[in-house]
Image (spheres, rainbow, N blue to C red):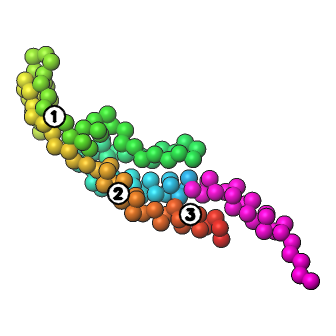
């Protein structure tokens, strides 16, 4: 007669299931950090403020890759022409103050979307985190 005690197997399964959420979140955080590195590599670097605003945020099991600069959306997606609501638009280029009634559109310069595509390809990071849990 062969007897099998399932207590050890059940304990191992409980440990795996108990750590699954953290393992997935850890793997996603590692993946998001890789995505942040890629976004920082791709982002246009005029003042460096947009690059510095790229960060990984984690709240419990939720992990987000964010570009916190208020103008990040316009760099990523571009924008149409801008017409001054008042007398003129004022901006500084190479230390020189310029006034214009309108400016033309700005082309998109994506950096987050390509970083997202990079992250999709790098999902093996999450798989490795799960494998560490199982071992």
Question: Against 80, is 50 above or below?
Answer: below
Local SS, label 1: loop
The tag on residue 129 is 3
| Residue named by callout 1 | 80
From this viewpoint, which residue is outermost toward the right?
Answer: 1
Q: Residue 119 lies in what quarter of the image?
A: bottom left
- Residue shown at the point (46%, 57%) measured from the top left: 31
Identified at 28% across, 35% down, the residue is 71
Residue at image location 44% in from the left, 54% down from the top: 33
Q: Residue furthest bottom?
A: 1
Q: Where is residue 120 in the image (x, y as percent from the top left)?
A: 40, 59
Where is the N terminus found, in terms of image quarters? bottom right
Magenta residues, as a range? 1-24
Looking at the rendered image, the disc whose residue lies closer to the viewer, 3 or 1, is 1
The residue lying toward the viewer, choosing from 71 and 107, is 107
**Compared with residue 94, is residue 40 higher up or lower down, i.e. above or below?**
below
**How far apart in space, not on screen, are marks 3 and 1 (Cα)?**
43 Å
Mark 1 or mark 2, earlier in chain: 1
Front: mark 3 or 2: 2
The answer to whether 61 appears left or right of 54 in the picture is right
| Residue pointed to by mark 2 | 117
Write the residue at 79% across / 63% down. Answer: 11
């Amino acid at each position: 007669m062969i007897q099998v005690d399932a207590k050890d197997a059940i304990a191992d399964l409980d440990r795996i299931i108990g750590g699954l959420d953290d393992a997935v979140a850890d793997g996603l955080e590692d993946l998001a950090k890789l995505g942040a590195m890629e976004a920082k590599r791709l982002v246009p670097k005029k003042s460096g403020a947009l690059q510095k605003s790229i960060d990984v945020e984690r709240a419990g099991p939720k992990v987000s890759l964010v570009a916190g600069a208020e103008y990040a959306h316009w760099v990523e997606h571009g924008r149409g022409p801008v017409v001054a609501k008042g007398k003129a638009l004022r901006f500084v280029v190479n230390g020189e103050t310029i006034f214009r009634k309108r400016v033309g559109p700005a082309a998109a310069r994506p950096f987050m979307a390509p970083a997202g595509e990079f992250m999709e390809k790098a999902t093996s990071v999450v798989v490795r985190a799960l494998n560490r849990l199982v071992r």
